[in-house]
Amino acid sequence: MQWQPVSPQRYMLAEGPFWDSSTAALYFVDIAGMLACRLDTRGLAQWHLDEPVSAFIPTDQGDALVTLASGVYRLDLASPTDHPRLSLFSQPDRMPGNRANESRCDKRGRLWLGTMQNNIGPSGEDLPVERDSGSLFLLEGNKAMPVLEGLGIPNTLAWSDDGRYLYSADSKAGQLWRYALDVDGLPVTREAWAEPGPGVPDGSALDAEGYLWNARWGGGCLLRYDPEGRIEQRIALPVSHPTSCVFGGPDLRTLYVTSARPGKAAGPLDGAVLWSRLEVSGQPCHRFKG
């Protein structure tokens, strides 16, 4: 595969890529850099926030949700990038010292939000994660319901096309899990699903064949898992710390990969958002309904 950066910019901790098919726009964040970013035909827009931001997801109302340490906010996309207009939407996690991390919407347009002990210092430096204080919340409207507790670093939120399973990782535990879901789409049982590989499991995307593409933090690659959790392919990347990926483009055959630039990463593309064309298409992202 040939990988190219989408822009010259390098981020501290780019994460949470989201492809909005209706507007042909790529949304992502720089968690430590406190940026909510949107790339479309008009160029790159970056809203500067006052807190680490872990996800940037458009809504059916034409604005977007941003997940901050202090809560989930609505962001007016028409507001100036240096003075974003925010309104508090929900505060799911009231645990002191926690922050938001992985967030995705399921097919029903409900927001799933994973939280964790804050690991970002006031200057964007890394702090250790020493406790499993994270949880997974489900937001339908502005009502939040806790779904899972005792998580270290929740990453990956991806649903099988038939709605039977949720794939989710705990990067602190180094494990990708598969949860069986009930008729309401809530997890009921959990199994250790994926073969181990290089690095630590981070964010993921599912392709149209039901294979999971998982970014490997510190592993410099993506792993493509088959539906039984076996490694089908290892895809080398020109970055040391990939964080997540998403399928985009008009045919969902462009794979976008976000990456980080921690202190030990010194490569020219570390911290870039990358893209490459694939033969297989991916599953679409879903806006928040509400």
Image (cartoon, grey):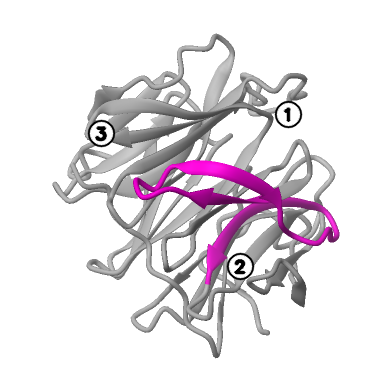
Which residue shows up at 61% across the image and 59% down it?
272
Which residue shows up at 64% across the image and 20% down it?
133
On the rendered structure, is 23 left or right of 190? left
The earlier-in-sequence mark between 3 and 2 is 3
Type of the residue with mark 1: Asp
Closer to the eye: label 1 or 2: 2
Type of the residue with mark 3: Arg
Which residue shows up at 46% across the image and 12% down it?
94
* Distance from Cα at disc 1 to Cα at disc 2: 28 Å
Residue that mark 1 sits on: 126
* Distance from Cα at disc 1 to Cα at disc 3: 27 Å
On the rendered structure, is 100 left or right of 86? right
The earlier-in-sequence mark between 1 and 3 is 3
The percent position of residue 10, horizontal first and vertical second, equals: 61, 53
- What's the magenta region? 177-206
Residue that mark 3 sits on: 74
Based on the picture, tell me whether residue 191 belongs to the magenta stretch.
yes
| Crowd rating for badge 3 (residues with CA inside 10 Å; few <14, some 14–19, many 20+) | many
Which quadrant does the C terminus fall into?
Answer: top left
